[in-house]
Image (spheres, rainbow, N blue to C red):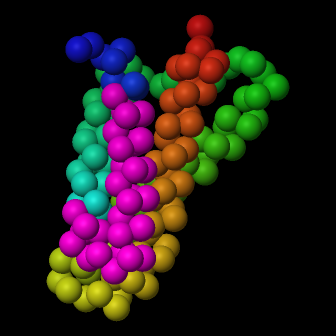
């Protein structure tokens, strides 16, 4: 494995997080608390692995810049900006949400999870979209 493999690995980890988040949502709607917990722990684990891999990649490779096609750049930058801002916001939200569940404070857990889940989902999905745009759909020179 080399440094150039990390973006694809990151996209796979984000995809896994998305699957676990979606399954966790379905399980809690069906009142299956154990399956919900397991999916959410798996989402946290894959997101943590993603973050470590992402930081290693960008520490070594530096910035990636979307140049072409020029007409799509504003759309890409809008997706990137919202993704980046919400990626920063989601970290403390996830930690608080998990802590409340761990402490069995489920009323407060539910209140914050209503915000945490959709933001986390958005960040996971847009992470994959950004990868696809940068490396698959519009590979940059």
Q: Is residue 61 above or below residue 73?
A: above
Residue 47 is situated, as x and y percent measured from the top left of the image, at 32, 48
Taking the spot 49% from the left edge, 51% from the top edge, the residue there is 123
Which residue is at the far top? 141
Viewport quadrant of the C terminus: top right
Q: Is residue 51 visible?
A: no
Q: Is residue 2 left or right of residue 17?
A: left
86 lies above or below 81? below
Assess whether residue 86 is covered by the magenta stretch.
no
> Which secondary structure is most common in the magenta stretch?
helix
Q: In the rendered view, does 81 fall on the left or right side of 114? A: right
Q: Nearer the viewer, residue 132 or 93?
A: 132
Whether the magenta-drawn stretch holds residue 16 is answered as yes
Foreground residue, 27 or 113?
27
Position of the N terminus by quadrant: top left
Q: Quadrant of residue 103?
A: bottom left
Residue drawn at the location 51% of the way across and 62% of the way down = 119
* Residue 24 position within the rendered picture, expressed as x and y whole percent measured from the top left: 35, 64
Is residue 127 in view from this perspective? yes
What residue is at 48 percent from the left and 56 percent from the top? 121
User: Going by the picture, which residue comes out furthest to the right?
Assistant: 71
In the image, 91 versus 22, the foreground residue is 22
* Magenta extent: 9-38
From this viewpoint, which residue is outermost toward the bottom?
Answer: 107
Q: Quadrant of residue 61?
A: top left
């Amino acid at each position: 494995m080399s440094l150039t493999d990390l973006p694809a690995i990151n996209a796979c980890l984000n995809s896994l997080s998305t699957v676990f988040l979606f399954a966790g949502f379905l399980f809690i709607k069906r009142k299956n608390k154990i399956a919900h917990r397991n999916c959410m722990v798996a989402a946290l684990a894959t997101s943590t692995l993603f973050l470590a891999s992402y930081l290693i990649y960008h520490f070594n490779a530096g910035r990636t810049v979307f140049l072409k096609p020029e007409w799509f750049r504003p759309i890409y930058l809008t997706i990137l900006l919202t993704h980046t801002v919400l990626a920063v916001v989601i970290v403390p939200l996830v930690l608080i949400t998990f802590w409340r569940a761990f402490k069995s404070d489920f009323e407060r857990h539910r209140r914050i999870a209503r915000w945490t889940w959709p933001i986390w989902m958005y960040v996971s999905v847009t992470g994959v979209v950004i990868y696809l745009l940068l490396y698959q759909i519009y590979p940059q020179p």
